[in-house]
Image (cartoon, rainbow, N blue to C red):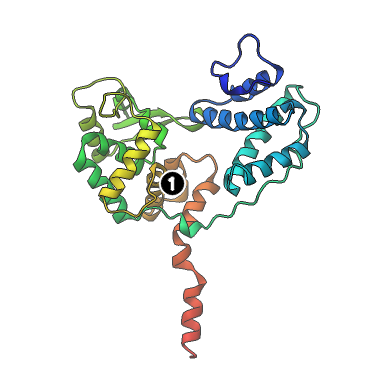
């Protein structure tokens, strides 16, 4: 059985039924999302091939064993297993809708519980983010623009890497703006405050078109290169280990809330489709400040 790793142009000649099913599912997505889902399907298809199972004939029991394979042999944590199984839920849901299977094997599939400690995901403080921005701008215009896009505008790393110089050559109602297509193919128009616009223009220099963020060899910045660059800059700024591109986006959303932006405005800034996602940032940033431990300590200390 072939696996879907060769499906880069989706439908083509000599595809098996399961490859067509995979292509039909992947066609719903673009960019990094499609790449991630393709990797998840490849793991399933490879496992099925080793065990002599047609993915379109897999039962819930097969997928339960596949989940144990992810945990025990691949060493995936609960969050990774949950995400991969969620991909399979989407795949089989579309296969059922397309009449490629008669029953969805994921309906009663056990999903691992993923626990989040919101107090541990506060990201960078205002001082730390400011120090990182200053370090990046002092090192080079390219680094300054990269960190500014993620840390001050809240862009995802793929969005920052894909910014073209032409994308911020627009003015809307007196505001210089950046136009982009974000996650899920959603267009966005973002106003550019003066410090942000200055950083972008310094990075562009004399260029008037093409990718804004370039690597030292002149090729466009990609996710992997951006990850390495951010880690290096964070170390130079004296920040704790573990800073990565999404840390900057997280910090920018938290900063919007800390600066007093209403939750609705913060949701628009973050471009979250569900306000509950933004609420998590709001709840997490003040968990330690509001924690009842402060009240209990003060209450009991008065009687001690």
Is residue 236 among what the camera can see? yes
Please determine whether, in this image, residue 201 is positioned above or below residue 132: above
Is residue 173 among what the camera can see? no
Please determine whether, in this image, residue 193 is positioned above or below residue 122: above
Q: Which residue is mark 1?
A: 266
Outermost residue on the top side: it is 13
Quadrant position of residue 160: top left
The answer to whether 40 appears left or right of 168 in the picture is right
Nearer to me, 135 or 78: 78
Residue 225, given in percent of the width and then of the height, sits at 35, 34
Check the picture and name the quadrant holding the N terminus. top right
Residue 284, given in percent of the width and then of the height, sits at 48, 57
Nearer to me, 176 or 26: 26
Q: How many marks?
A: 1
Please determine whether, in this image, residue 45 is positioned above or below residue 154: above
Residue 292, given in percent of the width and then of the height, sits at 51, 72
Quadrant position of residue 146: top left
- Residue drawn at the location 51% of the way across and 52% of the way down: 280
- Residue drawn at the location 55% of the way across and 55% of the way down: 116
- Residue drawn at the location 20% of the way across and 32% of the way down: 202
- Residue drawn at the location 38% of the way across and 54% of the way down: 260
Nearer to me, 65 or 250: 65
Outermost residue on the right side: it is 102
The answer to whether 207 appears left or right of 52 in the picture is left
Residue 236, given in percent of the width and then of the height, sits at 25, 48
Tell me the element at label 1. helix
For mark 1, does the 10 Å Cα neighbourhood hold few (<14), some (14 to 19), or many (20 or more) residues?
many
């Amino acid at each position: 059985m072939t696996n879907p790793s060769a499906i880069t142009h989706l439908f083509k000649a000599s595809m098996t039924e399961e490859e067509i099913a995979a292509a039909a599912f992947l066609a719903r997505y673009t960019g990094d999302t499609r790449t991630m889902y393709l990797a998840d399907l490849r793991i399933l298809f490879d496992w099925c091939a080793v065990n002599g199972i047609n993915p379109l004939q897999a039962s819930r029991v097969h997928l339960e064993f596949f989940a144990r394979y992810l945990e025990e042999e691949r060493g995936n944590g609960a969050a990774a297993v949950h995400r991969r199984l969620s991909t399979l839920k989407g795949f089989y849901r579309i296969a059922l809708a397309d009449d490629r299977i008669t029953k969805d094997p994921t309906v009663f599939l056990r999903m691992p519980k993923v626990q989040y400690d919101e107090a541990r995901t506060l990201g960078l403080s205002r001082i730390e983010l400011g120090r990182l921005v200053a370090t990046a701008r002092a090192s080079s215009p390219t680094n300054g623009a990269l960190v500014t896009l993620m840390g001050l505008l809240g862009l995802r790393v793929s969005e920052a890497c894909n910014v073209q110089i032409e994308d911020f050559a627009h003015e809307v109602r007196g505001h210089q703006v950046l136009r982009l297509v974000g996650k899920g193919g959603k267009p966005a128009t973002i106003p550019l405050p003066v410090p942000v616009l200055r950083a972008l223009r310094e990075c562009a220099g004399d260029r008037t078109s093409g990718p804004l963020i370039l690597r030292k060899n002149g090729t466009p910045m990609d996710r992997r290169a951006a990850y390495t660059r951010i880690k290096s800059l964070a170390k130079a700024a004296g920040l704790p280990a573990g800073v990565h591109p999404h840390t900057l986006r997280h910090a920018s959303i938290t900063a919007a809330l800390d600066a007093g932006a209403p939750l609705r405005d913060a949701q628009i800034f973050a471009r979250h489709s569900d306000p509950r996602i933004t609420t998590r940032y709001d709840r997490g940033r003040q968990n330690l400040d509001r924690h009842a431990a402060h009240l209990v300590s003060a209450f009991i200390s008065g009687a001690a």
